[in-house]
Amino acid sequence: MVSTEDLQYTKKKVLLVEDSRFEQLIFSDLLKGYGFEVETASDGDEAIKKACEIFLPDLVLMDIELKGNLDGIDTAKMILKRRDVPIIFLTANASSEVIKRIKSIKAYGYILKGTDKKAVIPSIEMAIKLHEAYSLANMFMYIYENSTSELYVFDPETLKFIKVNKSARMNLGYTEDELLNMTPIEIKPEFTKESFVRLISPLLEGKMPEVSFETIHRRKDGTTYPVKIKLQLFDYKGRKLCLASVENIAERLKFERAIKEKEKLLKSITSSAYDGVIVLNAEGKIVFWNPACEKIFGYAEDEVLDKDVHILLATSEKLIKAAHKRLEQFKRTGRIIGLKNPIELKAKRKNGEIIFIELSLSVLNMEDEKFVVGIARDITERKKAQEEIKRTWKLYFELAENAPVGILRCDNKGNILYVNNKLIEILGSPGEEETKKINLLTFPLLAEQGLSGKLEECLKNNEIGTYELEYTSKWGKKVWIRVHIKPEEEDGKVSGALIIVDDITEKKEMEKELYLLSITDALTGAYNRRYLLSKLEEEIERAKRYGEEFSIILLDIDNFKKINDGYGHIMGDEALRRVAKVVRERIRKLDVFGRWGGEEFVIVLPGTSVEKAAILAEDLRRNIADIVLPCNERITASFGVTEYEKGDTIDSLIKRADDLMYKSKNGGKNKVCYHK
């Protein structure tokens, strides 16, 4: 018997399933002597109940030849359906049929009953260790595969991906097989192989434990999204591997940009505001103080930030106590109770001068925090202040009327209260009264474009919103507009909204033009090779998925070098332009025509058989042959036409068309060859 100090498996539970009472006693004593907690069962039904409901063992030692309806193997199958537990079989029969049945289930081996009973202990120890290791490995693999972060494992020498988790595959749009044939460079357009190797070299040289950087990932469909990446090196079976943990930061960057825009807007508004703007946190500390406050109270911003506003502004101990009471009330309820805006009170300037101010208070909700916003005005000279108010409002009105953006205000029911001249111009409206007949929440055109729903959501949630849409107004004017919605409050309730409308038609048209420039050949106006490749990839994917047919035509201008050498590149360029013009005038809108390179062009024909493509190629051949250049030279072209076949790649499809084109060249040029 081993000593207590040598026991390694105290508290590990073993279920012994044996119908022989004698064998039960022998094995039980043996296992208990090694520190195992042991429970026995005499038949299959009892074993299933104890294994899955009562005892819940760490291992099952199972006799194969059990009495009753279930033998040991059938019992093991029933247990494994309900619990993942290692099972070792005891058998007196090691026939091939028995071994085959044992292998058919998830077992951890078998022990012949005739062997030394102590031989079972190493087998049990090994089975428990293997099962724990297997369970741990499965757990880590599950965590890796189902992590919300993109996780990649790649070889830092070859840069080939070795493992890519589900989040990465879903975000990129590639299958696992596709990614395992790729490298990080292929999804990071900002990097070359050399620049990426330089980036990770401190990691490989042991100078840094990890490398972090921000870049963009390119999906299979060509779209991109910003990411933050952490790279770490680890050893696996004597091999250095790199783990990349990737966070999609699109929402974070969008949020940061929105915050900066709001901060810029707030700073611009408050810096030019006549009234003082003070923002307090729930502790009564000043967190914002605009230049107007400095003029009113004499304190610079850095002198008051994070200071108690009551000590700075209040002139008596009684007023300080009352203010603190209000602050505690605000902290509990998140509201300003019992005060009617505006209120008048005394304040003390930095130089000790006592002044009267008019203060309006409101609550600002920002994420999980609440703030008090105070609008302060010096009313020491009431008449002068009133006159200043009139002048200021007139200025605001004139600014709004002559603003370079459209401005309108509406109530919380969508009725327009104010529109400026620029908005009337943007919409093409005949005038203010006609525009005001539109209800922003119910007008059909606005509802169809989704703007009514956005406005309703902003009013309901008291949230600022910015949206872009292409809009055709009631008066037939088509524009791209950017709409900024800012809800307005009265007495703590949303009363309507201020809406700023920018005409971004020119910007959108420029973006469209820039996009067209990026996908077209400058000389001929045909699509460029990169765009052709993307369209070929789309058509191949469509053919694979839906079984749709398509064909391609590859044409090459005959004797082009002769024209270039004999008449110069200007004449060569003219030849390319004229050929492109002939092709564009003949093909359909859905066909894709592009310059493959040099004097070669490719036409992608969706939904077209090779026979119909060959007819089109023959028409093009004749039309091109009618071209006469200013130098009196005629142009001809040779054509290769082929149809997509199952298993084709872009390379195999282009090569087949190229071979057919050269067949046309070798056959005398000015011919069409196609593959049926």
Image: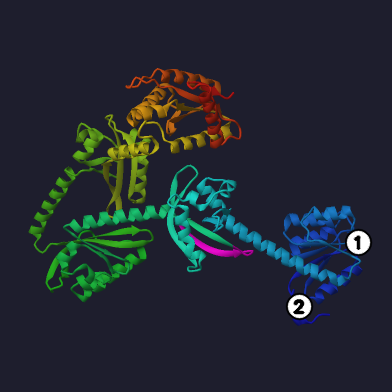
Indicate how the structure is coloured in the image: rainbow
Whole-number angstrom distance, CA of label 1 to CA of label 2: 29 Å
Q: Is residue 115 visible from the viewing direction of this image?
A: yes
Q: Residue at x 81, y 62 (%)?
A: 88
Figure quadrant of the C terminus: top right
Q: Position of residue 570 (x, y in %)?
A: 32, 30
Q: Is residue 463 left or right of residue 149?
A: left
Q: Determine which quarter of the picture holds residue 46.
A: bottom right
Q: Position of residue 464 (x, y in %)?
A: 32, 50
Q: In this view, does 231 lie to the left or right of 626?
A: right
Figure quadrant of the N terminus: bottom right
Q: In this view, does 616 lie above or below 339?
A: above
> Mark 2 sits on what residue?
7
Q: Residue at x 20, y 43 (%)?
A: 404
- Name the element at disc 2: loop
Q: Quick check: marks 1 and 2 in contact, CB under 8 Å?
A: no
Task: Indicate yes or no whether the magenta region holds residue 496.
Answer: no
> Mark 1 sits on what residue?
92
Q: Where is residue 230 in the image (x, y as percent from the top left)?
A: 48, 61
Which mark is on residue 135? none
Q: Which residue lies furthest to the front in this view?
A: 566
> Which is the main secondary structure of the residues drawn in magenta?
strand
- Name the element at disc 1: loop
Graded by Cα atoms within 10 Å as few (under 14), some (14 to 19) or many (20 or more), the crowding at tag 1 reads few
Question: Foreground residue, 74 or 578?
Answer: 578
Question: Foreground residue, 399 or 551?
Answer: 551
Q: What residue type is labelled 1?
A: Ala
Which stretch appears magenta? 228-239
Q: Earlier along the polypeptide chain: callout 1 or callout 2? A: 2
Q: Is residue 164 visible from the viewing direction of this image?
A: no
